Image (cartoon, rainbow, N blue to C red):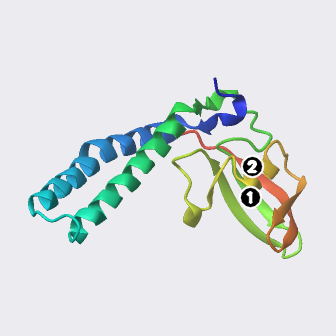
Amino acid sequence: MSSMSDRIPMSQKGYEKLSELVKQYESIDMPAITEKIAAAREEGDLKENAEYHANRENQGMLQAKINLVKSKLSRAFIIDPSTIDQSTVSFFATVTVMDVDLEEEEVYSLVGAGEEDFMENKILVDGPMAQALLGKKVGDVVEIDAPKGTYELKVMKIEYDFDD
């Protein structure tokens, strides 16, 4: 029985994306590796066969990926957008924050597993910055712990976009 803290919040879209990933790993990637291993086996001496060993390693790494994604899916907690209080920072929010010291604005979207993308400032809702912002309203200031010390972010704007 998993506790609430083990649950991984995600959107329906994120859940489907991870499900597709498992399908691809299991039905396309794994058979391809298994085939390469079989082919390398037919070449005889496996001790000297670098290809065989590389593919055995790839097989192990892919299996670990499959297990990880399946574990996330088994703990998935699908968030229903209609249950969200849109006046506060919550799951799915796009938050504009200002670094109080630098007076620089940045925009972050809080997303679930499978949808994070650091290049697009899509941060995991269970990550440290998102956790600090959750439940805050416009005007609130939060302290974020960073490797170089703490810094303060002021919530400037909270937006939700549930079109997709």
- Label 1 sits on a secondary structure element that is strand
Left or right relative to 149: residue 4: left
The residue sitting at 32% across, 54% down in the picture is 59
- Residue under label 2, please give it: 158
Kindly indicate whether the residue at mark 1 contacts the one at mark 2 (C-beta within 8 angstroms). yes
* Residue 45 visible: yes
Q: Where is residue 47 in the image (x, y as percent from the top left)?
A: 23, 67
The crowding category of the residue bearing disc 1, from other C-alpha atoms within 10 Å (few below 14, some 14 to 19, many at least 20), is: some
Q: Earlier in the sequence, mark 2 or mark 1?
A: 1
Left or right relative to 98: residue 34: left
Which quarter of the figure has residue 5?
top right
Left or right relative to 27: residue 101: right
Q: Quadrant of the N terminus?
A: top right
Numbered-mark total: 2
The residue sitting at 64% across, 34% down in the picture is 7
- Residue under label 1, please give it: 96
Left or right relative to 59: residue 105: right
Check the image and report above or below for 140 versus 87.
Answer: below
- Name the amino acid, label 1: Thr
Labelled disc at residue 43: none
